[in-house]
Each structure stands twice: as structure tokens, then as C-alpha cells.
Image (cartoon, rainbow, N blue to C red):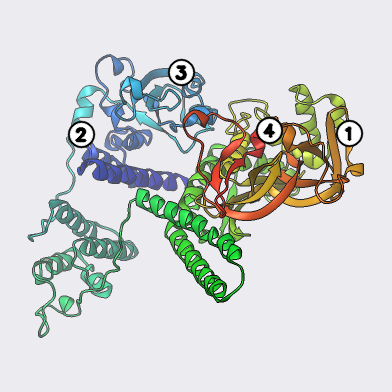
Amino acid sequence: MTPELADRLFRALDQCARWVAALEDTGALPADAAQAADTLVRGLSGVSAEGAAGGGEAAGETDAFPWVAALAGEDRDGMAGGVLTAIDYRPDPECFFTGDDPLALFRRVPDLRLLRIEPAEPLPPLAQMDPYRCLLRFRALSGAAVEAVMPAFRSVPDQVRIGSVTLMPAAASAAATAMAQPPAKPIAMALPGSLAAAMLEEQARILDLPGSAAERGSRSAAVARAVAAILTALGRPADRAVVAAACADAGTLCRFLTDDLLEKGPPENGPPEKPAVAEARPASPRRALRVEPERMDALMALVGELSVVKGQLGPLVRRVGDGELTRDMKAFSARLDSLVGDLSHAALRLRLLPLARVFDPLPRLVRDTARRLDKTVELVLDGAETEADKDILDVLGEPLLHLVRNAIDHGIEAPERRAASGKPPGGTLRVRGFQDKGGVVVEVSDDGAGIDPAAMRKAAVAKGLLTPDAAAALGDDDAVRLVFAPGFSTAGSVSDLSGRGVGMDAVRTAVERAGGRVEIASTPGSGTRVRLSLPLTLSITRVVVVEAAGSFYGIPVAVVGGVQRVPRAEIRGVKRAESIVLRDRVVPLVRLRRLLGQPPDDGGGRGDGGESDCVVLAELSDGPVAVAVDDVGERADVVLRPMTGVLRGLRGYAGTAVLGDGRLILVLDLRELL
């Protein structure tokens, strides 16, 4: 195995994925599938489309760019006969929010010969067009080498394909397209669907290909797995050992497939004539029930409403007083509470998916990114079996991608720099997932250069974010957290894979919008660790109820680091700003009344004659903030309903919720308020 061979195998996998997507969408393969498959096979076997004529290795990569061979007229004139670099770029629809400018990328491509911009999908009517979504596909040809073109697309390695192609003259291109594949041995059988028959015929042809004994053995095992899967999909499952024995060669497989197993199923009485089918027996396939996501969302909404209604029963029981009826109602309330809890847990389990869903793409991303940067990176994944709500996984995908790219580009040094520092030439990137305190945590850590607090202070002053005195007074931990500031970056060039000043801010925004938080720790010379803490589900939110000016509000528990009373004598003020010392740290203090535009508190705190203030410590990515409130109530599980209608644009509020006693509260978004 070599990196070059792995590149070709990955191209084959990518092409197969596109074919599967085409089958799902249209039920048929694309018109150029046969040609693309032929060039893929010849590329894997080391024979290019023009290898016999001395065309060279580069032409073998045309398999990934069938549109190049379809060029005609003026597009082909002046370019045919030479080796070019083909670029196929499908930007992420949300690329404008992640700092990518597709046209700017192509402006950095050297010797650009051809650029085509086409819709990647049917465009919606103009009235329904979202100007903030990129629905385009970019295809281009460059006269520069692949190595010279790749740096322009270092920021989007998972969205672009780049390779060398030879643009043949029209006559030669037509001749290459006409090359025939070796004829496959037909299988005379009646199958429900020509696609399945064609797939089984292809498996028989694969067994008949030349090769060593080891190659034939590996090929036979792969064919056996494919045949077993096809038969199961046809509703004719067979014993895997029997299928493996039948895949010894093409002839045996053909006889096995044309047997009565496909026509009538295995015989009921007595052994059949062919030993290969004698042991065949139907398996009991696992039954699965597919449910639309909308129905699952509706179920979770009903469970949430039931939890709220259940909470209203407690106050009613307390109002009844003592007596036998009260005891019966308490027992009934306890039983109902248990059943609703079990129902909520069961409904939540239906939506849980393993973190492997967002972990699986990382090995390919790390490999491709490291190769583009000429770095050696080992990826260590841990906790892929940890489960979380599917909505949480959707939120987690993009931030995790940003963190991995950032760690490879800016965290892990180049091999020669690592060797000079006494480190192994290859870096290590660890991604770990686990459940903690009713939520899910994902950590991304590397053993790279780390973040230099001095460089962060210098960059903050240069960008006007801090005065020199304020930067000098900033602690190392707070200086490292500046990486989350909007538009903040210490990168010297925006052409880097990351460091455009939007990545880490986008990570923080996405995680906090989902009710989570981001923590970062870095040691210069040793590495960086970023921790994403998210709730287990977005369907039910746990809040702390607080009071301000006679009104009640909710603060998500995920951002609450503690609640305590602070003597007013310990609150220090400078003009209108206030601060306190909590846990040996100076923490800014803000008053919720002032944040909400309510009249100031003239009666002091509760229960102590106004000698202290009730303070909620909010742990945000920028650092802790103490929020002074009039009083703190209970913690409650609520169904958070986003603002709608004219209130949708109201900043500072995450939504509304109903408490168990029927009170309606506003749930605060402290990050927006602050």
C-alpha cells in the first residue's frame, strides 16, 4: 500500500458513492458510468487511457473528471494534447458563513485556462432563492501542475477534487470511449430486477479475473460478502458459509445462483442434488421499522408537553391538604412521575445515534488535509459508540470539522520543525467523546505547538480589540480565549486552511446556540485541547428559574456554573462597572434588571435586609460573568419554544417555556444579552 494507491482507491470509493446517490435519486446510473468505471479500473491497474501509446501516468486520472472528455469546440481548442490540472469544486452551501469565497479561491489558481460555473442542483424560483446559500458547482482547467494548484484549495479539502488529465483531440477521445470491457459471463436466471442480475453477473466476472492465489482468495471473500448482501436484499438470504463455498470460482457461483434457491427457495424435504445448496437455509433477517423524522419530532414534543403537565400535579396535591385522598393522590403522582420519566427516556432513546456518525468522516479528512500540508498526523478516535440526540450530532458536525482542520494546520507542526523541537516527526490528533452530567462532551486535542498567549495579546492590540495596558493585564488563560473573538486570527495569510478569523467564532456560536459551551486549554510547545460540552437532547431543556423586578426568567443550566449570595461590601465598583472575586478570580458583575431595561433594585436582597446580592455565575466561552438577580427558584425541565411572529427578531431571548405550575417564563440567551 502506498499513498498514491490509496488516493486512487479513495477516488474509486468517491465515484461509487456518487453512483449510489444517483441510483437513489433517479433509479439509474449516469450516462457516463461505463466510461468512468473503465478508466477507474485502468487507473487502479496502472494502465492509463493512453498507456499503450506512451501517454503517461497522468492520463489515468481522467476517471474522476468525465466532464473533461466531454469538452468540445472552443473549450477544447488550444488545450488538447497536453497534460492539465482539472478542478471540480462543489462548495458547501453554507460556505459564506464559514469564510470561504469560491471565486476568490479560483483567483489564486495559477495559469487558469477554463472556468465553468454551473448550478449544482435545480435552482428554486427567484422569489424562493436564498442569497446566502451557494448552490453552484465550479469546474476548471489549469496549465499549472497539481502541486501548484492545491494550495489554493487548502481550506476546502473535503469539497474539491484535483488531478492531472490529458485532454485528447476529438478523434482520439472518441476512440478511447469506444474501448470495450471484457465480456461478462451471462447468468441464465430469473431475478426480480435487472439491476440485481447485473450486479450478480459482475460478481461472477470478478471471480474470473486473473491473479495470484492470494489475490483470488481475497477477491473470493469480497465477492461472497457482496453476493450474500444482494441475496438478502432480494429476500433470499442464504447461509454465509454456503455462499462462501459457492464463490470459489465463477462457474460454481453461476450454478449456485441458477439453482432453485432463487426460484423457489431451499427444498423442504431431502438434500438437493448439488452439495453447495444442501446446507442452505433461510436466515431470520432483523426487522426494522422506518419512521420519518417529523413523526419522531412530534412524539418528543408530546412527551415534553406531558412532562410539563405532570409537573402541574405536584402543586395541586399540596393544595389538597392532609387526609386519605391526599395520600392516594401522592401515590398516583409518584407513579405518574415514574411512567412519564420512563416514557421520556424511551422516546429519547429512539432519537439517539452514536458519535460515529460524525467521527467516521474524520480519518479521510485528516489524511487528505495532512497530505496537502506535507505533514504526518495520526488520528486517534475514542468514544465513537457514545450516543447523543440526532439534532446534537447535526450541530456538532461543522464545529468538529473546524477544530480538526485548525489542529492540523496551526496546531501540529511540520515534521522538520517537530524534529528540531525533539518531538516525533508525526503529530497525534485525538478526538474523544463521552457522556458527562447528562450531556455529551467531545474533546479535540493535539500535541502541536500550542497557543502563545503573548502572540494573542499582541494580535489583540494590533486589531484594536484591547489597549496595550489591558492586554498586559490579561491572564494567559484569558489571552488564549481571545481565539473565540469574532474576526480574531494570528494567521499571516488568509489562504491558509484555517485561521481566517471566522472558524473558532463559528464553533463557539454554533455550540452555544445549542445550549452548550466551549472550553480551551493550551500549553505552548505541548499542544491544545478544545472541549465541546452539549446537552444530550435539544427537545427538553433544563433551566434555573430566576426573578428580576417581579418577573420570572429561565437560564439554561448548561451555562450556570454556580449560585451564591455575595455580601454587597465585597462588590467593587468603578464608575458604572462592578466586579467581585469568585474562586480566586476577578469576575465582572452585571445586574439582570439593567440588562433587561428594568428599574434598579431599591430594596436590596431577599431575607437579609439588603446586605447581599444573589448571584448566578454564568460560564461563557469568553470567561465567567456574575449575573445579579433578585432571587433564584427551582430547576425545571421545560420544552423550549422559539420566538415566532413579530417577536422572532427579539434579541437576548432563546424562547418561551411553561413551568409545572402553569407560569409562562422567558428563557434568556445570556451570550446575546451580554
Residue under numbered circle 3: 111
Sequence-wise, the earlier of marks 3 and 1 is 3
Q: Nearer the viewer, mark 4 or mark 1?
A: 4
**102 in relation to 264, above or below:** above
Q: Is residue 576 visible?
A: yes
Q: Residue furthest bottom?
A: 270
Q: Residues within 10 Å of mark 3 (few under 14, many from 20)?
A: some
Q: Nearer the viewer, mark 1 or mark 2?
A: 1
Sequence-wise, the earlier of marks 4 and 1 is 1
Residue under numbered circle 2: 177
* Residue displayed at 56% across by 42% down: 399
Q: Residues within 10 Å of mark 2 (few under 14, many from 20)?
A: some
What amino acid is labelled 4 in the image?
A: Leu
Mark 1 to mark 2 CA distance (whole Å) = 80 Å
Residue 33, image x and y in percent? Answer: 23, 40
Circle count: 4
Q: Dot 2 lies on which element? A: helix
Residue under numbered circle 1: 573
Residue 605 in the figure: left or right of residue 25: right
